[in-house]
Amino acid sequence: MTINYPNGSQHQVTKKESAARGMLFEHELNDSNKYYLIQDRAVIYKKPTPIQIVKVEYPKRAKAKIVEAYYQAPSTTDYNGIYKGRYIDYEAKQNNAASFNYELISKHQVDHLNKVDKHGGIAFVIIYFKKIDKVYLIDIKYFSKFYYDAYNGGKKKSLKASEIVDAYHGHEAKIGYAPRINYLDAVDEMYFKK
Amino acid sequence: MTINYPNGSQHQVTKKESAARGMLFEHELNDSNKYYLIQDRAVIYKKPTPIQIVKVEYPKRAKAKIVEAYYQAPSTTDYNGIYKGRYIDYEAKQNNAASFNYELISKHQVDHLNKVDKHGGIAFVIIYFKKIDKVYLIDIKYFSKFYYDAYNGGKKKSLKASEIVDAYHGHEAKIGYAPRINYLDAVDEMYFKK
C-alpha cells in the first residue's frame, strides 16, 4: 500500500506501520469507551490480550518479572460490557483496503457473537476502513450469513465497504472529537429504535 | 495455616501453596463456566490477566517471544458475560480463614461493580472459604455498604462467613460434581425470583 502525502511524496507502508494503524483504531475505541464511562453512558472495556506465561523470575526487592511468554489466540472478542441495561459484545477490526476479507475474523469469534445474540445480547462487528476513513457496524446476524458461506467454501471471500449498508444492514459510526468514534449512536439506531 | 491429613500427619501451608489454592478456586469456576457454556445456560468467561509487555523478540521462523513483561492490576473484575439476557459481572476470591478481609478486593473493583449494578447488570462478589469449604455470593449493594465503611476507616475490617447470610443477604453456591460450583442457581435465587 502507498500513502500519498499532500507535498507529493510517496511512502510505502510496511507491515509494522499497518499493525500500528490497527493499534490506532483500537486506541481510539478505548478512548471512546473511556469517554462513555466518564459520561456514565456505558460500561465497556477492552479485554486484555491473553498471554501464555512460561517463565517468571522473582528478583529480590522487585516485582515478579515475566521472562518468557507468548501471545495466545483470544477465546472470545475484544470488547464487552453493559449499555442501557443490556449486554454488549463486539469484535473490532481495521482494514486498509475498501473491502474486508472474512478471514480477518476467526470462526470461534463469530460463533461466540452468535451465542451472545442467541442469549439476548447485542453482538456486532465494527470495522474501520482506512482507505475511505469510515467506520461501520454490522449486526452479527447479517455478518454471519456471508461469513459462514465464505467459511464453507463459498466464492465470496470479502465484503466491500460500498455494500455494507444495503446488503449487510450496516450502520455508520461517526468519527469525531469526543468521543472519537461515536459508535453507541449507531447501536441506538440498530438495537433501541422502536 | 496447618492442614491435618487423614493419616495424622500435619503440613505447614506455604504462601506458594496458598496461591495455588486460589488458582484452584479460579480453575473450578472456569470449569463451571465451561459446563454452563456447553449446556447453553450462560456465556461467561474469565478475562485474561493484564500484562504490561516491555520487550518482545522476533526469532526467525518462530513466533514472537515476550522476554520482559510484568503483571498489571486489572481495571475491572475477573468474570463477565451474559445470563438469561442480562449482563453479569463478578469478582471471585478465595480465602483460607473463616473471615474475609475487605482489603482483598480493591476499591476500583467495588466501584466497577457498583457501576454495573447502576446500569442494570447483575453484580456480586463470590468468595470461597477454604476452612469451612463453602462458597458464598454477596450482591454488590450489600457488600459495598460494609466495604466502603472499612475503606473510610471504619473499625470492621473483615466479614465472617457466619454472618454472610443474615447481615449480607448472602447466598450459598452448592459445590458438586458438574458444575463444580453451581453458582447460577444462587444467581437465580438472588436476581430472578419473583
Image: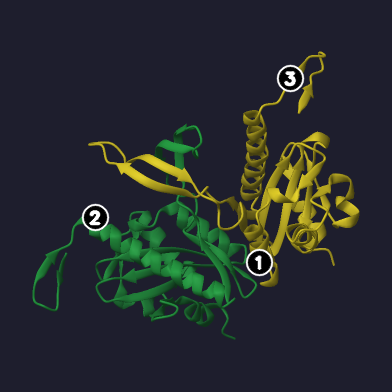
Chain colours: A yellow, B green
Instruction: Judge the density around disc 1: few (<14), some (14-19), many (≥20) Cα neighbours within 10 Å.
Output: many
Please, what secondary structure does the residue beneath circle 2 have? helix
Q: Look at 40% across and 79% down and name the residue there.
A: B172
- Quadrant (top left, top right, bottom left, bottom right) of the N terminus of chain B: bottom left
Q: Give coordinates of residue B63: x percent, y percent.
A: 50, 40
- Residue tagged 1: A116
The chain containing the residue under callout 1 comes to A
Q: Which residue is mark 3?
A: A11
Element class at badge 3: strand
Q: Amino acid at mark 1?
A: Val
Q: Is there one chain holding both mark 3 and mark 1?
A: yes
Can residue A41 be spotted in the picture? no
Picture residue at 62% right of the left edge, 60% below the top: A108
Q: Which residue is tagged 2? A: B16
Whichever of callouts 3 and 1 sits on the residue coming sooner in the sequence is 3
Q: Chain of mark 3?
A: A
Task: State left or right for residue B45 relative to residue B135.
Answer: right
Q: Is residue A181 left or right of residue B10?
A: right
- A170 vs B69, left or right, is right
Same chain shared by disc 2 and disc 3:
no
Amino acid on which the number 2 mark rests in the picture: Lys
Q: Position of residue B89 (x, y in %)?
A: 53, 64
- What amino acid is at disc 3? His
Most foreground residue, A154 or B135 = A154
Residue B161 shows in the view: yes
In front: label 3 or label 1: 3
